[in-house]
Image (tube, rainbow, N blue to C red):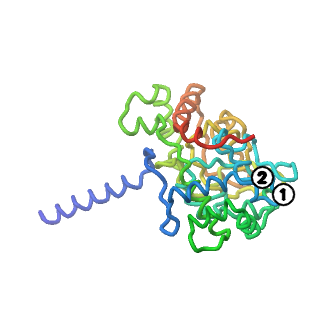
Amino acid sequence: MRHNFRLLVVTALACALAWANDVPRLEPLTGLPPHPPDNPGTPEKIKLGEMLFFETMLSERRQRSCSTCHKPELFFTDGFSRGWSLQESELSRKTPNLLNVGWQRSLFFDGRAKTLEEQASMPLENHQEMDMDPEKAAQRLAADPLYSAAFAKVFPGEPITYALVAKAIAAFERTLVSHDSDLDRYLSGDERALSPEAIRGMNLFTGKAGCVGCHHGPMLTDHEFHYTGVPEREGDKLPGTKYKTQSLRDVTRRFSFMHNGRFLRLDHVLDHYDRGGSAPESLEAEIRPLSLTSEERSDLVAFLRSLNGRVDDLLSQTPSIP
């Protein structure tokens, strides 16, 4: 009997620990994103990647670079509600910021790229973005004495291919880190880091509002795909399409929200979640109405402001864009 009781207690404790590990919770973001074994982030490679990030030779008409749509002074976004094409028209998606991109488990709102190395060629191949054959871009760089010498130093004995270009750009992008936010400091033990309003907002975030169900962990995302009833724009995906949960870090530094830039202000985002989305009658969003008071909305915004990392040093070290 005693043996059975001990077994029951041990089993209950094990189940409790497993449940605790599965409960979505907020965690501080620390350290730096890991570099994959086949692409270590050496200082020389990161510097080369930074040069390439600002290089217009990577676009067909030499008029665009990665930094055209990911401006450091705009927290690596473009400042528009949606991306702007070579044809001087809006794209169907907003431009995501690149801060903390090294921790993302997939890239693009539909998650079609799994690594930064895989993602690097896709804007080039898109006729609305850079309209450039990646290998032609590599040939241009190989013909340039400055880049020829830089690649020879970083990748000795290897011919310049776009695979190497992608490795260098990815290595640089993994250095674009934004943490040490007020929330990080609070979760690390500094009880004065959050205002009373932000603490109330955090309790709403993890409680009544249920935001933590999808926005949790160090990156404030579950890295999964959900349908939240965001209205699709005409000619885009079908209603009901699921998109990747966006990280909420630096959320108040954005110029639009949702995958298609549908909302321009945080108030509009709160309206959307408060009413439980805008799904057509034939569909059901994965959220529910919240019935927030005006004070609760204000507290949530105060909490969201606490998610901005301290990135002054990072931004001051990158070139400004005309």
Foreground: 90 or 147? 147
Residue for badge 1: 61
Q: Which mark is residue 216?
A: none
Q: Position of residue 167 (x, y in %)?
A: 59, 64
Q: Going 38% across and 30% down the picture, which residue do you hit?
A: 191
Identify the image quadrant of residue 298. top right
| 160 sits to left or right of 239 | left
Using the numbered discs, state the Cα–Cα distance from disc 2 to disc 1 in whole angstroms.
8 Å
- Dot 2 falls on a residue whose secondary structure is loop
Q: Do we see residue 37 in this rendering?
A: yes
| 231 sits to left or right of 297 | right
Q: Check the image and name the residue furthest to the right.
A: 87
Q: Tags 2 and 1 in contact by the CB under 8 Å rule?
A: yes
The relative height of residue 192 versus residue 279 in the rendered view (above or below) is: above
For the N terminus, the quadrant is bottom left
Q: Check the image and name the residue furthest to the left.
A: 2
Badge 1 density bin: few <14, some 14–19, many ≥20, Cα 10 Å: few
Which amino acid, by three-letter code, is at mark 1?
Answer: Arg
Residue for badge 2: 64
Identify the image quadrant of residue 118. bottom right
- Dot 1 falls on a residue whose secondary structure is loop
Q: Do we see residue 308 in this rendering?
A: no
The relative height of residue 187 versus residue 55 in the rendered view (above or below) is: above
Q: Going 65% across and 50% down the picture, which residue do you hit?
A: 228
Q: Position of residue 36 (x, y in %)?
A: 50, 65
Q: Position of residue 15 (x, y in %)?
A: 32, 59
For the C terminus, the quadrant is top right
Q: Position of residue 113 (x, y in %)?
A: 63, 64
Which amino acid, by three-letter code, is at mark 2?
Answer: Arg
The relative height of residue 296 versus residue 18 in the rendered view (above or below) is: above
Q: Going 45% across and 25% down the picture, which residue do you hit?
A: 196
